[in-house]
Image: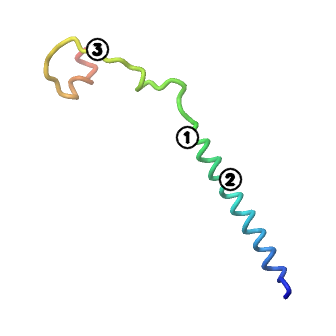
Amino acid sequence: MKIKQKCVFFYVIKKTLLITMRTFIFLCFTAVFSLSPSTMISQNHKIKIDKNESLTVDEVFNHESH
């Protein structure tokens, strides 16, 4: 039984290509998910409410009324 050289060659190329693609995807996901600001503004703000009244969301976040 003789192994054809073409089949072995394509198997090696296919295996190398799959390893390269997996490594590239892993590195891309690592880079994308590691990008974040040093201080997250939305998690560091504190809100103090002095009045007991009903307001809409637009009225609360409207900067002109303050």
Q: State which tag comes first along the sequence, 2 or 1.
A: 2
Q: Which residue is mark 1?
A: 33
Q: Position of residue 6 (x, y in %)?
A: 81, 80
- Outermost residue toward the top in this view: 50
Q: State which tag comes first along the sequence, 1 or 3.
A: 1
Give the mark count: 3
Spatial CA distance of label 2 from label 1 is: 16 Å
Using the image as rendered, state which of residue 59 and residue 64 is in the foreground. Answer: 59
Q: Residue at x 65, y 47 (%)?
A: 27
Q: Position of residue 55 (x, y in %)?
A: 16, 24
Q: Residue at x 72, y 63 (%)?
A: 17
Q: Secondary structure at mark 2?
A: helix
- Outermost residue toward the bottom in this view: 1
Q: Please state if 40 lies on the left or on the right of 35 as rendered.
A: left
- Label drawn at residue 53: none
Q: Which residue is mark 2?
A: 23
Three-letter residue code for mark 1? Phe
Q: Quadrant of residue 45?
A: top left
Three-letter residue code for mark 3? Lys
Q: Secondary structure at mark 1?
A: helix
Using the image as rendered, state which of residue 17 and residue 61 is in the foreground. Answer: 17
